[in-house]
Image (cartoon, helix red, strand yellow):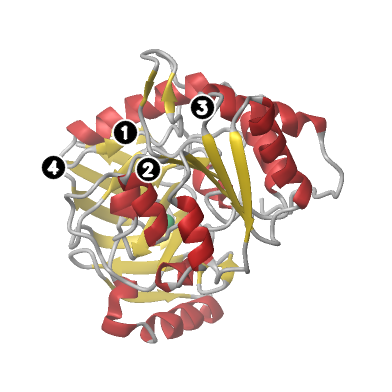
Amino acid sequence: MLSVPETTTGLKPEFIAVVDKIYRQMCNLQAGTRVLIITDSRTPRHVVTVFMGMAMAMGAVVSVSENFLAPPPADQPGFEWNPMVVAASREADLIVDLAVGYASFMAEAIERGAQIISPGDGTGGHHIEESLIRTMLDVDLYQMRREAIAIERLFTSASEVRMTSEEGTDFTMNIEGLKGIASHEFLWDPDTQTKILDWSALPPAAPGIVLPKFRGDGVVAADGFFLYSDLHQFPKSPVFLTFEKGKIVDIRGDDRLLVSRLNRWLDGIEGDTGRFGPVHFNLGINPKARLNEHPEFEKLRGTITMGIGDSSLLTRMWNGAGLEPVVSDVHWDFIVMRPTIHLDGKTICERGIMPEFKD
Ligand SMILES: [Fe+2]
């Protein structure tokens, strides 16, 4: 199931259609909008050119900021950004993020009213063109949006989420009073013709919940990707993570290399903050997303992605203030491939299979 997407130095015409869809349908990009594209050497130049050229064609005022390569996403919350890109971000109405992800200046941009769209979840990458074509062009984004909203409502109304799996997961969280998040990634609501979201990570969609500190007890058998340190690692066998009151107290499994590397990395993080979580819990619903190193893995239909570590930027960028965040220099994620998810006893996903959504 682990796949390496096709990459090329040539421009695929379908990509122009995808970027048109993003700007027109998901952002409602208008003439005169100040668009800042932030990139680095991971993303092919022709991908940046399409984001720039399409915005220009729609009458936007566009600037591109190419930057020194940042650390890998897991280590990024503690990174100091180049002050020139920080200054440029203050003038933007819409930031197309192909390089940053979580950063304080991005949260500040949102807080003063800008919007951010992150094709590739903020890290860009050499495979972004193929990934976005596959996961967004032949997918009914409006249908996915309706399903994401329906799942958001189930999370909002539930007081407990329980996840089990045949691999050995038995995990519960009290989510009473917390608001679900649709993560359908539309910045613009075509029905109400209003701006509805500040930050969008493409491709869609992964509805779920952002959590305050100290939530979650039990064992999670993670059998998909681990994104930590500078690694994307696929475990040879499930890794068992034991949570007590929102903190990982034990990591074990037969994949001794992954377990020892992960524990060693976490041992080096000040205050043990790299073990606090989950800070987010999301159910992927995109039928075309695949398991690969691109963050589209978080959107893979029927899988759960859990985020651990820093949420101080996430709570600002994703769900507004109000939740007590985890403050850490790291944020890392892992996937459960075949979860069964119960929200107050209602099963929304069974052994990694979700029923086809009907309105
Ligand atoms: Fe995450």
Instruction: State which tag comes first along the sequence, 1 or 2.
Output: 2
Q: Residues within 10 Å of mark 4 (few under 14, many from 20)?
A: few
* Pointer 1 with pointer 2, Cβ within 8 A: yes
Q: Residues within 10 Å of mark 2 (few under 14, many from 20)?
A: many
Residue linked to disc 4: 176
Q: Amino acid at mark 1?
A: Thr
Q: Amino acid at mark 2?
A: Thr
Secondary element at tag 2: strand
Instruction: State which tag comes first along the sequence, 3 or 1.
Output: 3
Alpha carbon of mark 3 to alpha carbon of mark 2: how far? 31 Å
Question: In the drawing, what numbered circle is on residue 141?
Answer: none
Residue 61: image location, x then y, percent: 59, 36
Alpha carbon of mark 4 to alpha carbon of mark 1: how far? 17 Å
Classify 326 as above or below 116: below
Instruction: State which tag comes first along the sequence, 3 or 2.
Output: 3
State left or right for residue 248 relative to residue 199: left
Q: Amino acid at mark 3?
A: Met
Residue linked to disc 3: 26
Q: Residue at x 59, y 31 (%)?
A: 60
Alpha carbon of mark 1 to alpha carbon of mark 2: how far? 7 Å
Secondary element at tag 1: strand
Residue linked to disc 1: 347
| Res 138 visible | yes
* Pointer 3 with pointer 4, Cβ within 8 A: no
Question: In the drawing, what numbered circle is on residue 340?
Answer: 2
Instruction: State which tag comes first along the sequence, 3 or 4.
Output: 3
Residue nearer the viewer, 286 or 10: 10
State left or right for residue 193 relative to residue 130: left
